[in-house]
Amino acid sequence: MDKKQLIYEGKGKKLYKTSDENLLIAEFKDDLTAFNAQKKSSEVGKGSLNCQISSLIFKLLNQNGIDNHFVKQLDENNMLCRVVKIIPLEVVVRNVATGSLTKRLGIKDGTKLPFSLVEFYYKDDALGDPIINDEHCKIMGILDNDDDIKYIKDVARKVNTILIDFFDTKNVRLIDFKIEFGIDSNNKIILADEISPDSCRLWDKESNKKMDKDIFRENLGSVVDAYQEILNRIK
Ligand code: TMP
Ligand code: ASP
């Protein structure tokens, strides 16, 4: 399957048309951004690691009944995906308090939450991706009914359960993650985008060492070394 016209370039990926109007190619970039792209860098090999990790995770989720856009990995940096219309919502699931939750509510960093928290953020760079609730979703027309909101939260919780267990067997703690959904050609909501150390927080089970994009956010060293370690553990 060959790349045709570039249709979209985001912070982490470029999307290309293919000869099949229902399929696109996602090319994972080496660029690193944080804090709404106020901090920028790049590390050779980051895109390839995220493509490989994301492909393994989407396959695992498919095997566990979570419908998603992944079709197959084409090569180190390129993934073949079903075309979807992305819903402008960042769905965050948290098991442990850290990051913006800690800053917003003052919960001590590293506190295990009594239950997994699902949050919605409105995906809009100009507004800085503000946190929103179910009612904002409906008022903004991001999701227009309670069934779709419930469906997305249920899928997010299922993904969390599957990934907690999976990473646990690899001696990794799934602290939190962000997922995105899209609407496919049958008008069905499916999981899309990527699931990688750019979009998850992953801590080593023994040492709590960070193995995700916080390494870049907090200037803790090379993300490629940590992402390679994640890939080695999960493949
Ligand atoms: P946060 O604590 O900064 O809100 O991040 C929660 C989770 O979402 C964490 O796993 C990192 C991920 N995330 C993204 O994938 N993209 C983003 O733009 C942000 C802010 C967070
Ligand atoms: N994804 C956002 C950015 O690229 C923020 C983050 O991940 O910290 O700026």
Image (tube, helix red, strand yellow):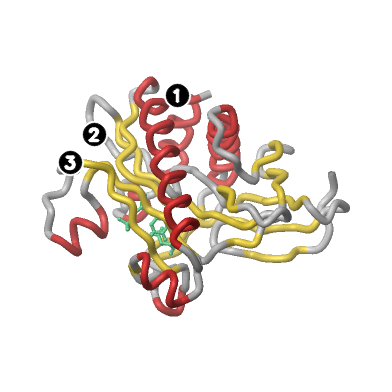
Which type of secondary structure does the marked residue at label 3 adopt? strand
Q: Which residue is mark 1?
A: 233
Is the residue 109 above or below the residue 17 in the image? above
**Mark 3: amino acid:** Pro
Is the residue 196 above or below the residue 169 in the image? below
Which type of secondary structure does the marked residue at label 1 adopt? helix
Labels 2 & 3 near each other (Cβ < 8 A): no
Q: Residues within 10 Å of mark 3 (few under 14, many from 20)?
A: few
Residue 168: x percent and y percent?
35, 25
Q: Residue at x 73, y 55 (%)?
A: 185
Camera-side mark, 3 or 1: 3
Ligand 1 falls in quadrant: bottom left
**Mark 1: amino acid:** Arg
| Numbered badge on residue 114 | 3
Q: Which residue is mark 2?
A: 208
Which type of secondary structure does the marked residue at label 2 adopt? loop
Question: Which residue lies most toward the bottom here?
Answer: 126
Q: Earlier in the sequence, mark 3 or mark 1?
A: 3
| Numbered badge on residue 42 | none
Residue 15: x percent and y percent?
69, 58
Q: Residues within 10 Å of mark 2 (few under 14, many from 20)?
A: few
**Mark 2: amino acid:** Asn
Q: Residue at x 23, y 41 (%)?
A: 115
Residue 92: x percent and y percent?
37, 53
Residue 225: x percent and y percent?
43, 36
* Nearest the eye: 67 or 169: 67
* Nearest the eye: 127 or 77: 127
Q: Earlier in the sequence, mark 2 or mark 3?
A: 3
